[in-house]
Amino acid sequence: MNFSFYIARRYLVSKNGKNAINIINILSFIITVVGTAALFIVLSGFSGLKDFSTEFSNYFDPDLKILPVNGKTVGISLSRKRELEKIPGVALVCAVIEEKAFLNYEEKNDIAFIKGVPDDYVKMISTDSILYYGSWLSQSDAQVVPGYSLASRLSLTVNNYGSYMQIMVPKPGANAINKLNMNSSFSRLDAIPVGTFSVNETLDSKYIFTRLSAARKLLDMNDSTASAVEIKLSPTANENEVRAAIQDIFEQPVKIKDKFQMNDALYKMLNSENLVVYLIFTLVLIIALFNVVGSIIMMILDKKKNMKTLLDLGAPVSSLRKIFFIQGSLMTLSGGIIGLVIGITFVVLQVRYDLIYIAPGIPYPFAMDVWNVIVSLATITVLGIIASYIGSRRINDRLLSQAKL
């Protein structure tokens, strides 16, 4: 066994003759354990928040969405739709229409995006999961399903056939609004809210679903035109191959977005927050590991006589430095591993038993992620090595000359 490692291990596990040094070593070890556990728990908490914040994408967004590069519409004739359906890995193709519209219900007004969807759209997204109250669209064009927040603002009553919601969009080419005759400036759809959906505050305030045929009639669009084409992939699909095949089918330039790209602003914000929190806790760890540097220096000063003996036996200065470098590294590594065990135990208990709640009935979302384990252990290891190196450099010619006196 390497004698530097052997001595470092003995220094780490054996008690020192001076009580103050023992206390400093124990405090340094505890701080390392607590710091690592805190870092892992916070990273796991943000992973859980990220999953919680983007959970809606799993049952609201399609796997792929085809959008026009130029203009507001994309051509989707029946023959082109069949070509898309024949692509290996494509399970479902749905043309959709999205347009901003003016809403009026019993003298209350609002603005939202109307989204026209076909009858088989229930196979595209989990409509059962997002439906909050009432029912989904049936065969009637005079039906809508608004978001819960939108319905609350307009005080909508579901299935109230005595009061219709008016959905209006400007007619193409209507440059000025005729206040005396609104019908000449706006296309209008009168519809009954048959249900409400709930996903998150943003989407609940933004969208109102209707049938594709009703949206086309409202916007005066033909059957071969849509705002976007949504694709559902089979579990065995190769997304890159599907993307390439889609680009070959469309004559006009189109952009294809996956769930991540559809919510890129949200993902960027969450990743930025995660990075900031990681950097803050890393800074806290750096400050905490000054205790490790201090404990190493205290050990060096206490072991001057031992170093004199080793020097007399022919040990080089580099070996003496290596002893305390290894001791500090072992301290931080062992503290980091124990801290990780504590952090992992806490996260597992939180995920399984809901120990902490954000609000009554809403447990704080935590997520077990191997990447967080790697990041936490790598961070404490690197910082521990740096701290140990700084502390071990305290062994210099002046100190050794004092040891020989």
Image (tube, rainbow, N blue to C red):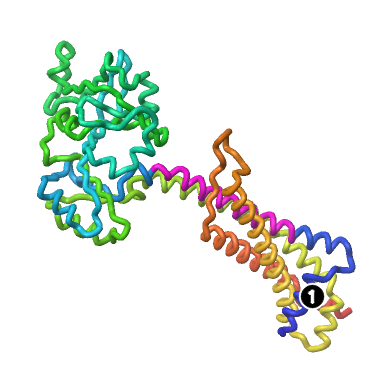
Q: Is residue 320 left or right of residue 86?
A: right
Write the residue at 24% across / 57% down. 243
Q: Quadrant of the N terminus?
A: bottom right
- What residue is at 65 percent from the left and 59 percent from the top? 341
Indicate yes or no whether the magenta region holds residue 174: no
Q: Which residue is mark 1?
A: 10
> What amino acid is at disc 1?
Arg
Q: Is residue 101 above or below residue 239?
A: above
Q: Which residues are magenta?
A: 29-56
Locate residue 49, reporting x and y percent: 50, 45
Return the residue found at the far bottom. 314
* Residue beneath the point at 76% across and 62% down: 294
Q: Residue at x 71, y 59 (%)?
A: 290
Query: In the depicted view, which residue is nearer to us: 225 or 25?
Result: 225
Mark 1 Cα shell of 10 Å, populated few (<14), some (14-19), many (≥20): few
Q: Which secondary structure dominates the residues rendered in magenta?
A: helix
Look at the picture and state if 104 lies above or below 211: above
Query: Which quarter of the figure has residue 401?
Result: bottom right
Q: On screen, 274 above or below 210?
A: below
Q: Is residue 227 left or right of residue 267?
A: left
**As rendered, which of 235 and 267 lies closer to the eye?**
235
- x, y percentage for residue 26? 79, 61
* Residue 17 vertical position relative to residue 279 in the rendered view, above or below: below
Left/right of residue 294 with respect to residue 239 in the rendered view: right
Percent position of residue 258, x then y: 31, 51
Q: Position of residue 92 (x, y in %)?
A: 23, 49
Residue 25 quadrant: bottom right
